[in-house]
Image (cartoon, rainbow, N blue to C red):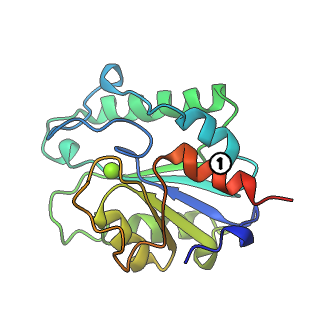
Amino acid sequence: MLPLNDITPSWTLFLDRDGVINYEKQADYIHTWEEFRFYEGVLEAMRIFTPRFGQIVVVTNQKGVGKGLTKLADLEEIHTNMKAAVEDAGGRIDAIYFCSDLEDTSPGRKPNPGMGLQAAKDIPSIDLSKAIMVGNTSSDMQFGRNLGVYTVFLPTTRPEVDLNDERIDAVFPSLLAFAQAVEKVEG
Ligand SMILES: [Mg+2]
């Protein structure tokens, strides 16, 4: 179970990108900033999270880069602009990790925990016993388990996922709904 009441600014929030922060494309990758669309309420959610989490880290598989379908420069532009838009709205993203590897055995490719372990190595204030992974796929939930952190599932794109899956600690309809729940327990 997710200990919502225990969250303090010593906690870390890991966020998947596509299907959590922005709309996924049906069976395709987001190739350019022009194709990137924030979900409704996400900028507000990021503003709510910002004072409540010490670190906010995006972890995203981007196989399209490895396949040569998305240009690395375009991915970097997406991330620069995404971060700037969040900041303009009063929020914060501290770090963004992506994995462009194609092989499911790659330690960096979710559900393997490489990106989270790298973040914890790069940012010493990250305490994995006080961290939450938010995602929209079973792979994200498995990543959370592999990393040893709590998990929040957003059923935005995968209606087939069993919400009672033991890898899911909590379910919210959107990132904003989760943010509002975090906001509510305070004080
Ligand atoms: Mg996703």
- Left or right of 125 on screen, residue 1: left
Q: Residues within 10 Å of mark 1 (few under 14, many from 20)?
A: some
Amino acid under disc 1: Gln
Q: Nearer the viewer, residue 21 or 102?
A: 21
Where disc 1 sits, the SS reads helix
How far across and down, in percent of the image, does residue 52 sit?
A: 73, 54
- Left or right of 12 on screen, residue 112: left
Residue lying at 60% horizontally and 41% vertically, measured from the top left = 45
Observer able to see residue 141: yes
Q: Is mark 1 within 8 Å of ligand 1?
A: no
Q: Nearer the viewer, residue 175 or 16?
A: 175
Residue beneath label 1, please? 180
Residue lying at 41% horizontally and 72% vertically, measured from the top left = 168
Q: Quadrant of residue 36?
A: top left
Residue lying at 57% horizontally and 28% vertically, measured from the top left = 84
Q: Nearer the viewer, residue 183 or 126?
A: 183
Quadrant location of the C terminus in the rendered image: bottom right
Observer able to see residue 92: no
How far across and down, in percent of the image, does residue 170 sit?
A: 49, 67
Residue lying at 53% horizontally and 37% vertically, measured from the top left = 42
How far across and down, in percent of the image, does residue 112 sit?
A: 31, 72
Quadrant location of the N terminus in the rendered image: bottom right
Picture layout, residue 82 above or below residue 136: above
Looking at the image, which residue sits at the far top?
Answer: 34
How far across and down, in percent of the image, does residue 122 sit?
A: 56, 63
Looking at the image, which residue sits at the far right?
Answer: 187
- Left or right of 143 on screen, residue 69: left
